[in-house]
Amino acid sequence: MRKIVAAVALSLLILAQPVRAQSILRDAETEAVFAEMSKPMILAAGLNPKDVRVILIQDDSINAFVVGGQTVYIHSGLISEADNANQVQGVIAHELGHIADGHVVLQSDGAKPALGIAILSMVLGIAAIAAGSAEGGAGIIAAGQQAAQGKFLAFTRVQEATADATAAKFLQDSGITGRGFLQFFKKLQSQEFRAGYVNIDPYAQSHPLSGERVATLTHTLEESPAWNTPPNQALNMRFLRVKAKLKGYVDEPPRTLTAYPLTDQSIYAHYARAYAYHKAGYPDKANAEADALIAAAPHDPYFLEIKGQILLESGEPLAALAPLREATQLTNYQPLIATTFGHALIATDDKANYAEAEKVLRQAVSRDDENPFAWYQLGTVYERQGDSARAMLATAERASLTGDARTAAYSARAASAGLPQNSVDWIRAQDIALTAQNELDDTRKGNRRR
């Protein structure tokens, strides 16, 4: 019976697996662009922009999903494939539709009937086998699995169609044209044809076919008052910058340099090549591309950030301080940029810079609770200042974020021993130690039950 249940539950499990199995890409500029492009639709959905996050995952497939809560995950492959910001807005609107309609919570409702079919077929199949019909029993079990899968896929197709309709409403209510939404589905449809997916069984899919979605959505989107609203061109330019730097970061350098040859002197090309050269180990060429960006916009914080990052990671932390300090100040101490600045201050090995590094990094961790690298750097500066207790507390914080309960528990207890009792840091260390120990105890109990 366990095998049958696993087969039926597969569609549920794949919703949760990607976040753990794939790498989350964090970039200050990208996150700012995602926040800006999604905010009107988040408000149209009746949600709070402070509670909704759009997160980028390094995966070259064209996909986006939600797994619970109010977080939208987008694959880097989708960003690379999208032609403009409006297309990505359509995808985000669809995922917000899943959140607003409570689809993740309702997944269990769709799984229950399918599970019932699977269990019933298992009982009947075993009975047939016991009666001497091994072949007939196996056939009943196989047919039950297929029926269960079909039942669940039908449920998910309804959810996807509903999310499409909700997305169209969010786009309309936020005054954003649905042209990009439709364009992206047509793009997917063209790819299906090129890949030879002509005779796809629509009933074996978790989503309606792209052609069906285009046909269903066309009238609704074209009738929207926002249909002829021009897309936000300033936002689109920022999106194209993000797309270029992403390709420079995730693609192999030769591929990036083919897509953005030296004859291309656009901002996007300089951005992509700066990352490609840096990734390939050509700091002089990377620096030249960064300088071209800064020449075009001397006080753009993200151009200053890449300049400082290249210098820092090329072994020139002292030279990296000026551009990173300005980038940090211009973005009001954006946590990711501030963390890189703090790293550079520490990397100078100059004790005179440690106090500033501590200040910058403390701000970063207070404003971003999912930045283990910032905690690592803060622990480093505490250690260099001789504050071993707070260094251990920083290690505990980092381990807690990365799911290392054993290290979190040990480090938090070690920190408690050296911190003033009942201080804020001591109380925090106690909290981490208790939470981590509970996780360890639960894991041990689970292992004993198995």
Image: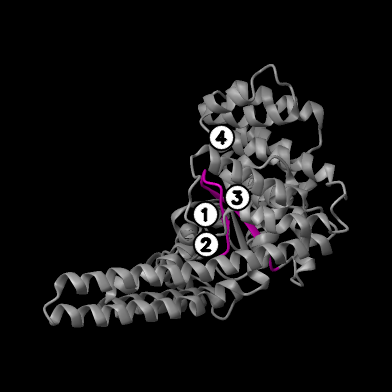
Q: Quadrant of the C terminus?
A: bottom left
- Amino acid type at image mark 2: Ala
Task: Look at the numbered discs 3 and 2 and tell me whether their residues touch, using CB distance below 8 Å.
Answer: no
CA gap, disc 3 and disc 2? 20 Å
Measured as percent of width and height from the top left, residue 198 is found at 51, 45
Q: Give whichever of 299, 321 is nearer the camera.
A: 299
Residue 449 visible in the shown view: no
Query: Would you name the residue on which mark 2 appears?
Result: 394
Q: Residue at x 59, y 33 (%)?
A: 248
Query: Would you name the residue on which mark 3 appears?
Result: 26
Dot 1: element: helix
CA gap, disc 3 and disc 1? 16 Å
* On screen, residue 289 above or below 81: above
- Amino acid type at image mark 3: Arg
Q: Residue at x 59, y 69 (%)?
A: 159
Query: Would you name the residue on which mark 1 appears?
Result: 376
Q: Give whichever of 357, 163 is nearer the camera.
A: 163
Q: Over which residues does the magenta segment extend?
A: 51-66
